[in-house]
Amino acid sequence: MIFYYAIQTVSVATQIALEEAGAEYKDQLVNFKTTEQRSDDYLKINPKGRVPALITDEGIITETPALLAYVAQTYPKAKLAPLDDPFQFAKLQEFNNYLCSTVHVNHAHKMRGSRWVEEDDKESQAAMTAKVSKTMAESFLLIENEVFVGPWVLGDNFSVADCYLFCISNWLAGDKVEIKDFPKIYDHHLRMRERPSVQKVMAIHGI
């Protein structure tokens, strides 16, 4: 497999999962500084022009929730998802899709405002940026109080959802949100940093 990633992006979540699974893969850096994600070569891999992307023997997979589910199902011995429990697997998907569809979008408003308004509409983009700390804090308060079971996202067992939560929780400081305001999330974050897979990926990304 070939895993396409960019430094300090949502790629971190899948990269941790691949390491947790003990997967054999080649990592391929996509340089955002040179807008390589928009190059003809990369657009042939992912026409969306985003990361991550994973080339498998069967084809290419994009989007973090899909990638995390794929890793968990492809390496069942790693026990990265409750594959034998349809309800709990749905809860995992529910959590991961919330991070993807809501929390990541909240964060993206800080520097990707032109996705939603015209490029020259600086006032609207500034308004979106100004609200990021509020929307990110609200999302993490919801996760802290209503969603996070503990000690891991789904309860006693570590899963790919923990990889995803750790990835996005790293963005809080840059979004001017204090992670210590969410004690359960903060504790989770510290414990994640102790895992060898996380330490390896952190070294790659300089986190």
Image: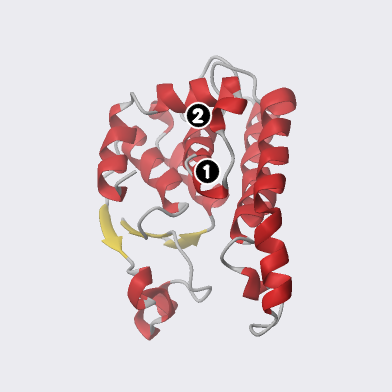
Q: CA distance from mark 2 to mark 1?
A: 15 Å
Badge number at residue 159 = 2
For the residue pair 112 and 21, the one nearer the viewer reads as: 112
Badge number at residue 18 = none
| Location of the C terminus (image quadrant) | top left
26 on left or right of 185: left
Q: Residue at x 42, y 21 (%)?
A: 191
Could you tell me how many numbered marks the image carries? Answer: 2
Q: Is residue 136 visible?
A: yes
Residue 8's x, y, as percent?
Answer: 39, 53
Vertical placement of residue 161 versus 68, above or below: above
13 on left or right of 182: left
- Determine contact: label 2, label 1, CB under 8 Å: no
Vertical placement of residue 12 versus 49, above or below: above
Disc 1 designates what residue?
A: 168
Secondary structure at numbered mark 2: loop
Q: Quadrant of residue 116?
A: bottom right
For the residue pair 158 and 191, the one nearer the viewer reads as: 191
Residue 177's x, y, as percent?
Answer: 59, 40
Residue 96's x, y, as percent?
Answer: 61, 42
Q: Residue at x 54, y 35 (%)?
A: 161
108 on left or right of 41: right
Vertical placement of residue 120 versus 12, above or below: below
Q: Residue at x 43, y 41 (%)?
A: 74
Q: Amino acid at mark 1?
A: Ile
